[in-house]
Image: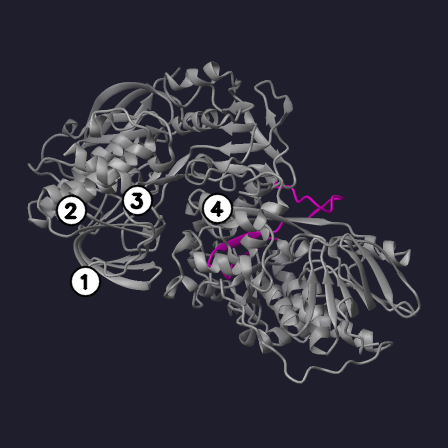
């Protein structure tokens, strides 16, 4: 099967270009498969992967023995192995799990025990004094904490972009604006009907995130889970706020959520969030003033100095939660079809591990491929703070977005590169243009002019994309 | 004279000339001015008039002139050029006047850090450079507060813009982002947005103001009526709706009713704040009330080699005011270079008491006979207020004047209101009357 490499004949069709789809595409491509990634949106990372807390988790608090726990652990390890070669940043912040009440303090040993069960052995209990020594700006009422040294901050958009970019560099194909409308399996191959015509592949991998259950239903006639979108709202503080804290500050989690996290971002801001709100809408993550105000208040309760800091951005994301706690990974017997569903909030951390697991599941019934003789390692142009940036280099053509220091050359590259962006949302995620404190006050006009020749066909009203999410 | 200016005005400086052969191999200038808006250009021109040799203006935008470049309406220029101009023509004249005076203007240059010396690191197409100066004037202006910072709920579709972004789109790039937007706010800039809309045949569906009256003065408040745009007072913008572009907004009316308005855009106007990001990471003291640097009556910052003028000092004043301020602070910088300004060490702080006053500028006074650059205290109130504006110093308390005012309204008190040669701290308070 894997020998037929004509343009429309693929070994693997991955539905969905979120972080999981991108990592799976990379994994299978590097194994030698001919991969096509099919994405409904104009750009990658347009669903659940659009908005997360950008942490590379160790999996210390995952349910021991779960698929999630093993994928997060494997994903964390693999990221450390490959990030430098792909040019992806790593901020070795470490995390503190902080108890704010006596009840929470009593739960710390239980959580530490769970961490060890999950293979995270280097957790350490800290007294209130030790906690405040590490984080002097922390509110006084912190009772105790434990440190998880290998919880890190990464770049939530460049990371999956880098995975897919490596896939493409080694022969994978991406089809965007390419919604799957149906499909059938003839016993040997899948034929997928998309809005861009038919795509033929031996195996289909459903990484459709918020639409995972619907794709299952559409292609296999049934699904073993239903997506229950969970909304997370975040507020982002301006760069000076990031000096207030060194570690990721995690609360003691409860049954529903990991709770409100405070952490620096790879871009030098400070993030407070998320909320956890169940909803039915799979598309719209609506911001609410009440929730944002509550986050601001909670942030100030944890770090009182935040009261004097500015919030520069707010966002809301949807996580593809299901009725189950664990990931929903199902290989459908005799159907050459694998579902990768319910990757709720740990997808960024687990993606590389999940991709490895999916490849193993594939091998249980599929043939191995012939890996490429040489593997290409394209480097992602860095947009993280504290790593070399384009604005520091000659020939950058000047800065367009002054708040986030995005150069004209970076924007042109994003518009023209191998994975050229097709929307203002895609451009923002690739370059961070307009994501800073002025939110486009200064650069909207210049950006509109620069993007017009590229985006016009896609947007009905000229300039209507300005200010878009 | 005016012929030359007209000629130069037709050209303006080259776009994005970066830093190539900027000030010779040493990257040195007597005075570096950050920001080529009305304040920065006025200061630069004045410095040259005072005989300062090398005056360099840096601006991060591709074209010099500042915000007026895209405010394509009257009234600009009366104070400066004795004639009524539109914003873009006014900006060109400012640039031309500075060039004619021998000022060197470089665009496409961003400042990355300010340190003692003064030493600046700047970036441009040429990469990162270090620049030395004897004095630095920071005149980076102000920007409007974003939708995000105001916690306006709803979705995040395209078509939600500040006035600045709208005017940039329309006047600089000829892009028209919507046909029927809602305008949030009733500050002067909100009416500037209405004029921009009118110019393009954009018909706002409503102007929304949470307060009980428009923030801006007569005659601006008659503009919506004249243009036939409903002015909804005591109305809050709750959420923005729409997926790719705005489809409407929900608002809360004074009686508590929640209504939906169809609209294809939102202009989030006003709530200016100083563009002080480069100061936030520096050694220069910031005032949390204005959001700009702490300055004395010469516009001098806590590091006396640095000065500030224009809307960086406070939100927000007109272009003409900023120009006047820039000119006066430019003069003070020239005096400083000649060693004619008093040492800042003898100065005292000017503070606020109570919650009614939002800010005061200048925040320090140095007792001296040298005439000030900022000749009055500038105040704003944080809410609609009525009462007596008082100050206390050395245990003496005096009423300055009675006030009845609303936020964003200009309040001025001459510096001479304070006794000569005081010591300690001067504290201003608005003592509100009971009703």
Q: Are marks 2 and 4 in contact (CB under 8 Å)?
A: no
* Most common SS among magenta residues: loop
- Point out the tag, 1 or 2, that comes first from the N-terminus: 1
Comparing marks 4 and 1, which lies closer to the viewer? 4
According to the picture, the residue beneath numbered tag 2 turns out to be B102
Asked if badge 2 and badge 4 are on a common chain, one would say: no
Q: Are marks 4 and 1 in contact (CB under 8 Å)?
A: no
Which of the chains bears the disc numbered 1? B
Q: CA distance from mark 3 to mark 1?
A: 21 Å
Residue A465, position in %: x, y? 57, 43
Residue B373 counted in the magenta span? no
Q: CA distance from mark 4 to mark 1?
A: 34 Å
Q: CA distance from mark 1 to mark 2?
A: 16 Å
A445 vs B381, left or right, is: right
Residue at 75% x, 57% y is A208
Which of the chains bears the disc numbered 2? B
Element class at badge 4: helix
Numbered circle sitting on residue B24 = 1
- Point out the tag, 3 or 1, that comes first from the N-terminus: 1
- Report if residue B353 is visible in the image: no
According to the picture, the residue beneath numbered tag 4 turns out to be A449
According to the picture, the residue beneath numbered tag 3 turns out to be B64
């Amino acid at each position: 099967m894997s020998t037929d490499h004509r343009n429309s004949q693929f070994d693997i069709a991955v539905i969905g270009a979120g972080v999981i789809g991108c990592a799976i595409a990379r994994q299978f491509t590097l194994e030698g498969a001919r991969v096509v990634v099919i994405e409904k949106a104009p750009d990658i990372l347009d669903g659940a992967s659009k908005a997360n807390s950008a942490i590379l988790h160790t999996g210390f608090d995952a349910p021991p023995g779960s698929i999630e726990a093993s994928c997060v652990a494997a994903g964390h390890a693999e990221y450390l192995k490959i990030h430098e070669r792909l040019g992806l940043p790593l901020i070795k912040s470490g995390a503190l799990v902080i108890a704010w009440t006596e009840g929470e303090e009593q739960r710390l040993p239980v959580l530490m025990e769970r961490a060890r069960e999950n293979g995270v052995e280097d957790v350490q209990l800290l007294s209130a004094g030790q906690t405040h020594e590490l984080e002097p700006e922390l509110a006084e009422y912190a009772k105790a904490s434990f440190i998880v040294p290998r919880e890190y901050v990464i770049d939530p958009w460049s990371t999956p972009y880098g995975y897919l970019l490596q896939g493409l560099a080694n022969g994978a194909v991406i089809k965007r604006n390419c919604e799957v409308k149906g499909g059938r399996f003839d016993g040997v191959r899948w034929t997928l009907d998309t809005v861009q015509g038919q795509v033929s592949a031996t195996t289909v991998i459903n990484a459709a995130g918020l639409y995972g259950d619907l794709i299952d239903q559409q292609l296999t006639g049934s699904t073993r889970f239903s997506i229950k979108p969970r909304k997370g709202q975040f507020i982002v503080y301006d760069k000076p706020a990031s000096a207030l804290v060194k570690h990721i500050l995690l609360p003691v989690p409860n049954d529903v959520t990991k709770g409100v996290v405070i952490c620096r971002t790879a871009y030098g801001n400070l993030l407070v969030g998320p909320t956890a709100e169940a909803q039915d809408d799979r598309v719209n993550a609506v911001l609410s003033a009440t929730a944002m105000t509550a986050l601001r208040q909670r942030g100030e309760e944890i770090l009182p100095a935040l009261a004097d800091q500015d919030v520069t951005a707010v966002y809301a994301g949807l996580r593809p939660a299901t009725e189950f706690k664990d990931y929903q990974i199902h290989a459908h017997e005799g159907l050459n079809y694998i579902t990768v569903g319910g990757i709720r909030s740990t997808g960024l951390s687990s993606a590389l591990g999940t991709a490895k697991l999916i490849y193993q599941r594939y091998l249980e019934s599929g043939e191995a491929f012939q890996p490429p003789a040489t593997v290409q390692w394209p480097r992602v142009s860095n947009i993280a703070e504290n790593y070399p940036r384009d604005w520091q280099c000659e020939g950058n053509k000047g800065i367009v977005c002054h708040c986030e220091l995005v150069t004209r050359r970076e924007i042109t590259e994003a518009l023209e590169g191998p994975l050229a962006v097709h929307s203002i949302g895609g451009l923002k995620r690739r370059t961070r243009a307009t994501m800073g404190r002025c939110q486009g006050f200064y650069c909207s006009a210049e950006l509109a002019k620069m993007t017009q020749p590229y985006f016009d066909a896609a947007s009905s009203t000229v300039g209507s994309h300005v200010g878009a999410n | 004279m005016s012929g030359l200016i007209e000629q130069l005005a037709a050209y303006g400086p080259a776009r994005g000339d970066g830093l190539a052969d900027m000030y010779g191999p040493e990257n040195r200038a007597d005075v570096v001015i950050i920001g080529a808006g009305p304040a920065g250009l006025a200061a630069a021109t004045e410095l040259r008039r005072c005989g300062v040799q090398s005056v360099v203006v840096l601006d991060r935008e591709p074209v010099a002139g500042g915000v007026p470049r895209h405010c394509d309406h009257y009234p600009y220029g009366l104070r400066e050029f004795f004639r009524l101009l539109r914003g873009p023509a006014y900006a060109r004249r400012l640039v031309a006047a500075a060039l004619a005076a021998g000022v060197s203007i470089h665009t496409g240059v961003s400042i990355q850090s300010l340190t003692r010396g003064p030493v600046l690191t700047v970036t441009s197409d040429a990469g990162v450079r270090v620049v030395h100066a004897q004095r630095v004037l920071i005149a980076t202006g102000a920007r409007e507060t974003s939708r995000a910072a105001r916690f306006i709920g709803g979705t995040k579709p395209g078509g939600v813009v500040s006035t600045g972004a709208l005017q940039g789109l329309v006047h600089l790039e000829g892009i028209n982002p919507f046909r029927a937007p809602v305008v949030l706010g009733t500050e002067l800039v909100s009416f500037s947005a209405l004029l921009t809309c009118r110019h393009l045949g954009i018909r706002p569906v409503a102007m929304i103001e949470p307060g009980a009256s428009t923030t801006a003065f007569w005659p601006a408040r008659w503009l919506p009526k004249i243009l036939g745009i409903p002015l909804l007072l005591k109305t809050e913008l709750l959420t923005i709706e729409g997926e790719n572009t705005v489809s409407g907004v929900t608002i809360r009316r004074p009686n508590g009713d929640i209504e939906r308005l169809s609209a294809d855009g939102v202009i989030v106007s006003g709530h200016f704040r100083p563009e002080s990001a480069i100061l936030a990471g520096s050694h220069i003291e910031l005032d949390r009330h204005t959001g700009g640097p702490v300055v004395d009556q010469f516009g001098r910052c806590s590091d006396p080699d640095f000065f500030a003028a224009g809307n960086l000092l406070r939100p927000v004043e007109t272009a003409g005011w900023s120009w006047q301020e820039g000119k006066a602070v430019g003069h003070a910088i020239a005096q400083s270079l000649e060693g004619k300004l008093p040492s800042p060490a003898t100065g005292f702080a000017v503070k606020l008491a109570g919650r009614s006053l939002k800010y005061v500028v200048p925040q320090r006074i140095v007792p001296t006979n040298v005439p000030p650059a900022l000749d009055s205290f500038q105040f704003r109130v944080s809410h609609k207020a009525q009462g007596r504006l008082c100050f206390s110093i050395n245990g003496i308390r005096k009423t300055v004047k009675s006030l009845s005012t609303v936020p964003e309204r200009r309040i001025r008190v001459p510096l001479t209101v304070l006794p000569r040669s005081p010591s300690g701290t001067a504290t201003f308070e608005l003592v509100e009357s009971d009703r």
